[in-house]
Amino acid sequence: MGGLSGRRIWLGVAAPVTALVGAGIIIVILLLATGHNPFDAFSAMGGAYSDPSVVTGAINQTTVFYLSAVAVAIGFKMNLFNIGVDGQYRIAALVAAAVAGAAFMSSLPSVLRIILTLLVAVLVGGVWAGIAGWLRVTRGVSEVISTIMLNSIATALIAYLLTPDRLAILMGNNVSTRPITDGGQVPNFDIGTGTPLFSLILLAALVGVAYWFLLNRTVFGFSIKATGLSETAAVASGISVKKMMFAAMVLSGAVAGLVGMPELLNGISGSYSLNFQTGIGFTGIAIALLGRNHPVGIVFASALWSFLASSSNALQSVQVPKELVTIMQGIIVLLVVIAYEIVRRAGIVLEQRDVARQLAVTAAREEVAA
Amino acid sequence: MTTIEMARTRRDVPLGRRRRMPAWGWLLVVLVGLAVVSAIRLFSDASNLTSAGAIEAAIAAAVPIALAGLSGLWSERAGVVNIGLEGMMILGTFGAGWAGYQWGPWAGAFFGIVCGALGGLLHGLATITFGVDHIISGVAINIVAPGITLFLSELLFTNAPGGGQRQSPPVSDVFKITINGLTDWLGTIESKDWFFLSDLAGIVRGMTTQLSALSLLAAILIAASGYVLWRTRFGLRLRSCGEAPYAAESLGVNVIRYKYAAVTISGALAGLAGAFLVVGLKFQDGQTRGLGFIGLAAMIFGNWRPGGLAIGAGLFGYTDGVRLYDSTSTAMHAVVLLLAVALVIVAALQLRRGNRMVALSGLIIAALAAWWYFSIDQVPRQLVVAAPYTITLLVMGLASQRLRMPKADGLIYRKGEH
Amino acid sequence: MSHPESAGHPGGGGAGTATGTPPAVRLTGITKRFPGVVANSDITFTVAPGTVHALVGENGAGKSTLMKTLYGMHKPDEGTIEIDGRVVTFGSPADAIAVGIGMVHQHFMLADNLTVWENIVLGSEPVGWRGIDAAGAIAKIDDLAGRYGLQVDPRALVENLGVGARQRVEILKVLYRGARILILDEPTAVLVPQEVDELFDNLRELKSEGLTIIFISHKLDEVRAIADEITVIRRGTTVGTADPRSVTNRQLAEMMVGSELPVPELRDSTVTDQVVLELIGVSSTDEDGRAVLSDVSLTIHAGEILGIAGVEGNGQAELVDAIMGIRPLSAGHVLLRGVDVTGKSTLARREAGVGFIPEDRHRQGLILEGSLWENRILGHQTRAPASNGWLLTRSAARADTRRIVEQFDVRTPGIEVKASSLSGGNQQKLIVGREMSSDPVLLIAAHPTRGVDVGAQAAIWEHLRHARADGLAVLLISADLEELIGMSDTISVILRGRLVGRYDPHHVTPEQLGSAMTGAGGEGAESPAGADLAAGNEAGEAGL
């Protein structure tokens, strides 16, 4: 659960590094096998970052990934597999966009409009996830199934709501929600790279800190962790597993509701349209796993994911399909967990040996004393 | 204790099973169900509820889901959770597309199976040999599979005749089975619009018209899986690995080998599910549309049993097939009423068991569905898509389910560590 | 360390070698290391064919490790195994099975969701032209069962079997494979005296057929009753052999632990008239609507230990869950110090002063992956010193964990190590220490000394005695009848979810309890009535 020592840090770093090197080797083999020059491919990917706007874009994407991964991680901490983050953030973004773009909002002060938008997103995400949580708690329906179903239902519902006579208007030949007017969006940071930096990166940081604090400092977080590690022990300890499950699911959905906010409140279009980013919920699952559900680990994982993704377009200049990056991402997830598993086993062996050795020393001392 | 207990446990239980509803009971349920459907068809004038065309479409929609569910069954019966079967399906679509356009549909099916099995082996390597969490490995495979298929499709299909960066050249179809004399006769009955008989005729005609050889194969595979898993030595050992791997190990069963066999078969079936989508069409990016997950849901719905997953897949396939075939949306409109009636029946059953809250929620939703049915003329086109998922959620939420997954499902097994 | 004279030279007792036939089993110089510990070191062990050979030693002495080596579940780091005079090496249990070794594990190795016959034939299934020959297998099992008096229904689902029947299935599994050498690992741990007698009859039957039996135990009376020869193991190595006809319990204990075994016993009665826990007509059903608790009424006073005796699976776990608020009641009331807590949550009951030592410490008592101080918080997460209600008070929790480690003699290098790295006895002492914190008024102790070493056992009994003297009410559940009789002020017997009798531990024998626990007629029938009189006023109160 916690605690740091020199050895643990060393072991913790060894795993991801080994995995990255391993993934690199596999990719090199794949490239050679398909008649490409690995050096060209890697230098093209590296070269992409010479453009500062690509770097800024990658950081912006990291923000989005981070929120999604934290949403997934909250579920994982309780052994709940929220596959539904994808549906939760999309439907939350749609409703929040519709509210933010609604006419009555223009008369409100800017801060209030933003808070209201975020609140709606959190609420809708929480409710949508809450359906799965409620079904799980009251009827024992596996959240894996219900969230898969709710994703598909969300897709249909969004298609239904995103039509001109409902929540959307026709913009050229695209339908979208009414664009947010001045003052409804959050100003970006202009860092002189051509692409502005999303200011909602601060929101993501806040969510990360809150997640850490919740897990490590509060009774609620302790109960979540305890339930995740041993449901039977949690029950015997007076932790209401059902309440915890429902709460964790709603909380996960609430954070998921924020996933679409950077694009909505910081993005150019300021509306929800058919072009709104999809699939981030699934990416979040991989990133949460890669980051070991740890608030800081997820930061690195989402950055890695996003930077890899943003270098993919550069591959086309050397005639390598850009899906190479996707393959790389998948292999990294797999290899990291394999490496962690090996490291974990080594760690347990080392700790047991330590305990045995220290106890042997104490026992010997006692015998001498006696 | 002995004599008393003997008296208590000695029941006439059929081999390897628990008490079940007798065959005539099931037949009765099916007949009553069909009568209800027929009545609603007549009432709402929605012939597509049981028309042969809709049934054909339903079968085509149900087969890949059933195969995916079967894939999950094999893996999970040996204790390996296979959420990566969506990825293995994708590998199957690629294999089928690549071999299919060159050497015909059967070669395509074969290569789909091979590619899927390779995915299964990868899952086995990660979960069985390296002891990685099953879910994580599955998620990773779901990321790698589309990546690698698109990577290869850009390299292999871009310059192929009729192919593209994200699709293969067309693949021809396997032969279709149609029983000519029978279907004509059934068609006549179907067109009479009689109560019950026309529906029955429509369904039977749908099943005997243009039935793909692969659909038949899928049906055989479901039955064969039941036989192999529950009646053979191989099956008993495989299931024992999913129930109590350390007990199996202590009796000399090579648990690792059986788990590998199970995930490989699982991958092969997922690959076949993918190939089914390709044969008669072509490989396309995003072709599986999450059907692997739906298959998994069907398997859980079916309580980790072949018959149950077939029913689950049928439910999905039916609503999806009717939706696709039914251009006017009248049938989907009728499905809303059908749902309301079904919920009333479920509520009545729940009330008899004493589950008042569940019964009440069922009735409320039934009332809402009925109200919705009468207040609209047509289900909005966009919402029709959600029908199978909504119905599944309702069924799982309201029906009494006593689900029992294999006891060691998803647990990491390490040889000699008990 | 003094050995009694009967302790021979290690491995010297091989009766078989004297007659010229090779020993059935001879282990020489077996050493097995696990990370950080040497589980077995230079063990020498010889078993003559056609005998019952007992391997005794306390929990954690290395008996099971040795038997796993003999059954091929792991390879020894050093040493040789000889079966019937031939040196063998085992790569897996399949190899051991092939030379005629069979093992009945302490924790049953059965698949609950398979039938009895499926469990038995698994790994050596008879196959016909259309799959497994189920009828043939069942006929063979029935035949074996009849021959050795091991009655069991081959078609039943293992899930529905009781402990005794499960054990018979385990033995049949071994016999079905034609084993000539049987290893039984702590087979009597979960049986009542009558079942133990039955098992011993079965074993004698098997011995008369020429089978060799290795019997692992730490219950000395049983060992002396069944064994032809005894080998004692201590701290991972053999310390000698003994002749069961001449050796005394005291001598065996001396060899096992270097001192006398701790005895469970209470001093003067501390029972007060202050009622702490009262159950009135408590009933509960399982998911299928079958009654698991029927009309259970009982009373525990401050300073009283109430023992619950019963065959495993007769409602003990459900009773505990009902008191703890984990299981909903279908009828009845639970009163804690006069306050009706029937509708209260587990947390509320814990906060009202209920301590809980659960039956399975790994599943219910601990978070194995958590550190010791995090485990200290468990169950106390809403109270000082663990938290202020909302936020954890980590330094206070750590400090209090150090107190428990000190006061309850938990052997650990620190409080940051994971609970999983402690031995069973130390884990249990940590739990006992935790549950006795925050001034409880009632302690539910389910099998508090199961699977712990004698040192921890003695310590836990001592803590229970102290708690009782301090006015704690204790509900003690145990499968060890000696512990129950020694540590209880009153004993109630539970059978199929009903309390079927109350006994005065001063006047009851394990056999009488055994009869009541199995609901056997005859001599057991009048005991409850008599016992009710013996228990006197309390029986009357329970009827309130």
Image (cartoon, rainbow, N blue to C red):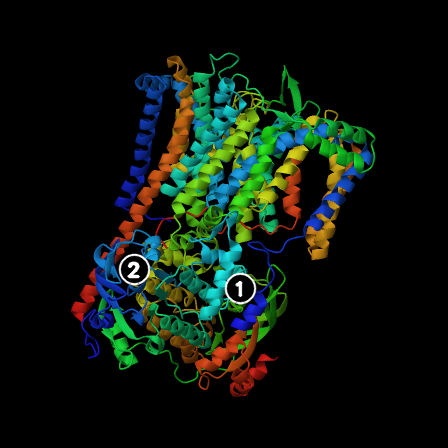
Q: Amino acid at mark 1?
A: Asp
Q: Which residue is mark 2?
A: C70
Q: Which mark is residue C355?
A: none
Q: CA distance from mark 2 to mark 1?
A: 30 Å
Q: Residue furthest front?
A: C129
- Residue displayed at 32% across by 47% down: A345
* Front-lying residue, B13 or A349: B13
Instruction: Indicate the position of residue C303 as horizontal and vertical percent values.
Output: 45, 78
Of the numbered discs 2 and 1, the one sitting upstream in the chain is: 2
Asked if marks 2 and 1 touch (Cβ < 8 Å), the reply is: no
Instruction: Indicate the position of residue B297 as horizontal and vertical percent values.
Output: 57, 40
Q: Which residue is mark 1?
A: C153
Badge 2 crowding class, 10 Å Cα cut-off, few under 14, some 14 to 19, many 20 or more, is: many
Instruction: Indicate the position of residue A116 as horizontal and vertical percent values.
Output: 59, 34
* Residue C43 visible from this viewpoint: yes
* Residue C234 visible from this viewpoint: no
Question: Where is the C terminus of chain B found, in terms of image quarters?
Answer: bottom left
- Residue displayed at 81% across by 33% down: B44
On screen, residue C255 versus residue B37, left or right, reads left
- Chain under disc 2: C
On screen, residue C10 versus residue C469, left or right, reads left
Q: Amino acid at mark 2?
A: Leu
**Is there one chain holding both mark 2 and mark 1?**
yes
